[in-house]
Image (cartoon, helix red, strand yellow):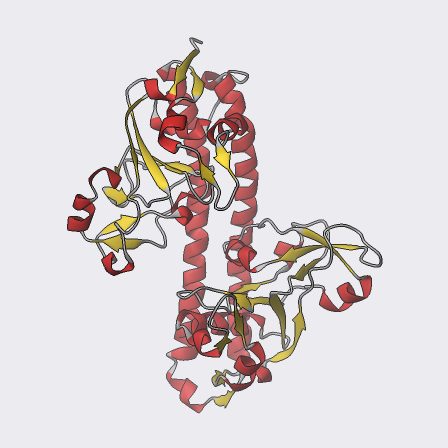
Amino acid sequence: MGYETYRIADLIDEIAMGPFGSNIKVSCFVDSGVPVLNGSNLEGFSLSEKTFRYVTREKADSLNKANAHRGDIVITHRGTLGQIVFIPQDSKYDRYVISQSQFRVRCNDKVLPEYLVYYFHTPIGQHKLLSNASQVGVPALARPSSTFQQIEVVLPELSIQKRVVEIISTIQKKIVNNQEQNDNLQQQAQALFKQWFVDNPDAISWKEGTFSNLIEKTISGDWGKDSPSGNNTEMVYCIRGADIPEVRAGNKGKMPTRYILPKNYAVKQLVDGDIVVEISGGSPTQSTGRAAAVSDALLARYDKGMVCTNFCKALKPRAGYSMYVYYYWQYLYDRDIFFSYENGTTGIKNLDINGFIETEPIVIAPEGLVEKFDAVCKTVFSKIYANGMENEHLALVRDTLLPKLMSGEIDASAVQL
């Protein structure tokens, strides 16, 4: 097939580091302009177009080589290592500014940049990319631009590269489409909640109350032990605050297994209709109070029962009110209400969840309307988790095929899309 070995230096026209030190201060950020990439934009195989901060075009111009354009590769060299994405030709923006934790690469005509990115997502590619990483303090690649250029890769001829890219990109586009559909479904459900329960002119006559009228009890989490120890023999999956965004997106997440007391599991086990709330953590710009709904579809994807970590609490709403509580909670979260119920000004912030549940005023909609909303949400959640499960299978196919296509074990020209 015409495989040849190259150093990265032979495959690139340009490599540039992100701006250092105070080149991008908080005061530089504006409401719109040129987006600044961060680690969350480089997660997975595809560039994520979410959660941007922006600088003016003039500021971006002043940063010169810290600008990444369509066709470029961006790699994290400090912090969460191993992140590498390609900026596609149809990306939302014509350029981006990379952060001080990233560097960008521009390839020559010997390699397709998408192929190179996919290569570094294989196990052998990740090993080579991280071979000079230091884990002392903040994880970092040693002399990132120079050591990266010395990496050797084995490449097939361009026609094979193109075919591999077509195969993997087709799978990846389906994954991204499912993710976007799930995001849209969540937004639709949230908009429906607002239409039916916030903007509804009849709401003025509804009963006022607090979440304590709708939540039967809250349950503390449990972290247990990392292996069976003493009476901690019950193996469980433990949902953390870090897992909440994944669960909300319809994904399985990467919950760790823990071992807790069987008697604790009996009272802390999560079931369909529960809501997990993060009560410790947050940041200056992100409050505690993030929530994820627990469903049978989520629980069925794990081979053991589930509890939440002790940095979270589980809410058990009244029968039929789970989706109403969940989306009401999210509505208030999006309005930054939870900042007012936090304590602790340094380090980890804690949510006064009992104070919030007992004092934050809400309206309590009629049961008939709540039941109708719950039925709609169950349909929405069913589709979200079906998409999430399909993405899990697609990712498995992608990750299985990729190294075999690149090594020639599977003939890329014979693969039917």
Residue pictured at 37% horizontal, 84% vertical: 201
Q: Could you tell me which quadrant the N terminus lies in?
A: top left
**Of the pair 5 and 156, the residue shown nearer to us:** 5
Residue 311 in the image: state x and y as whole percent: 60, 65
Residue 94 falls in which quadrant of the image?
top left
Q: Is residue 358 above or below residue 55?
A: below
Residue 363 in the image: state x and y as whole percent: 48, 84
Residue 2 in the image: state x and y as whole percent: 42, 8
**68 left or right of 367?**
left
**Of the pair 147 and 268, the residue shown nearer to us:** 147
Residue pictured at 32% horizontal, 17% vertical: 110
**Of the pair 54 and 206, the residue shown nearer to us:** 54
Residue 188 falls in which quadrant of the image?
bottom left
Q: Is residue 5 above or below residue 372?
A: above
**Of the pair 333 and 175, the residue shown nearer to us:** 333
Which residue is outermost to the front? 136
**350 left or right of 12?**
right
**305 left or right of 107?**
right
Residue 100 in the image: state x and y as whole percent: 33, 44
Which residue is outermost to the left? 58
Residue pictured at 61% horizontal, 62% vertical: 294
**391 left or right of 192?**
right
